[in-house]
Amino acid sequence: MKTEISKTRTARLLASFIRYADEKGSIDKLRDEFFEEISALYSNGNVLSQHLYELSEAGIVYYEEIGEDGFAPIIMVGCTKQTAGHLAGLLKEIEDDLESLRRRINEILTFDPDRLKSEIHGAGEKLGAARKSAEENELLRPLLRQIGEIEKYLNGVSAVADKYEDVYKNIIRPVQLEGRSGVEATVRWAVISIVASTAISVVLGNWKEIVQLFK
């Protein structure tokens, strides 16, 4: 059964391989330090061993235990031609995941319930006009079924939006305000740092502008 290990932990493991490997890719002279470092990444030694075997089978690293039962095995470990490339790929995937998460968080924090309600209301009015036209025109009556389906969908969206507004008011909005205050605090501390490293005469000459940043 394949061990489920996070991309971040695998990346850190491969970084250790590269850091301790010699010019030939072998980890021999600093083997004890190497295993001490990678063991700290795993709470269970068996999970570490299993992960190393899986990476070795995939050709990403080289790991082999040679020995007989009852004797301490001789461990052969090192990098392969794929180690650095696989690490670079993992870092790219982690970067993409973070960027996707940032976009999702930004969408949540910039959610505007009033605009959504306005758009739903506008769509409802257009659907109402379309229904009226279809009911009054024989040629357009076949569209009533599609209009009805769209109305059901719009009503569902409207119901979800109403529920989400409570989430916005109680959770998202406070986070937005906290984020804004954090930005304002950052600006204040930046100004304080500038003031601390600037001549008093310059500060006095621009005092009005500086005060405005604190409002």
Image: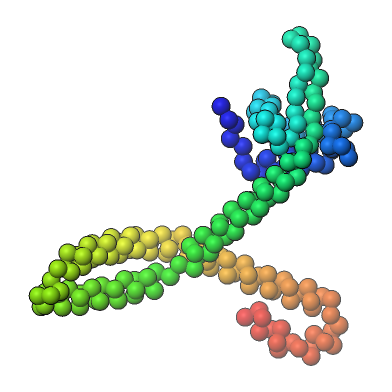
Question: Is residue 136 found left or right of 211 in the rendered image?
Answer: left
Quadrant containing the N terminus is top right
Q: Quick one: 201 or 5, which is closer to the camera?
A: 5
Residue 77, by quadrant, is top right
The correct choice, above or below, for 141 with respect to 94 in the image is below
The image position of residue 48, as x and y in percent, is 68, 29
Q: Quadrant of the C terminus?
A: bottom right
Q: Nearer the viewer, residue 164 or 19?
A: 19
Q: Nearer the viewer, residue 153 or 82?
A: 82
Instruction: Kindly give the residue lying farthest to the bottom in the view shown.
Output: 205
Q: Name above or below for residue 166 compared with residue 82.
A: below
Q: At 56% from the left edge and 65% from the top edge, which residue is drawn?
A: 178
Residue drawn at point x = 67 percent, y = 30 percent: 57
* Residue 137 seen by the camera: yes
Q: Describe residue 27's horizontal placement relative to residue 119 as left or right.
A: right
- In terms of image quadrants, where is residue 75? top right
- Residue at 22%, 62% in the rendered image: 149
Please provide percent x and percent y for residue 104.
51, 60
Across and down, in percent, residue 117 comes to 34, 71
> x, y (%) of residue 53?
68, 28
Q: Which residue sits at x=77%, y=40%?
A: 81
Question: Picture quarter containing residue 62?
Answer: top right
Q: Is residue 174 above or below residue 49?
A: below
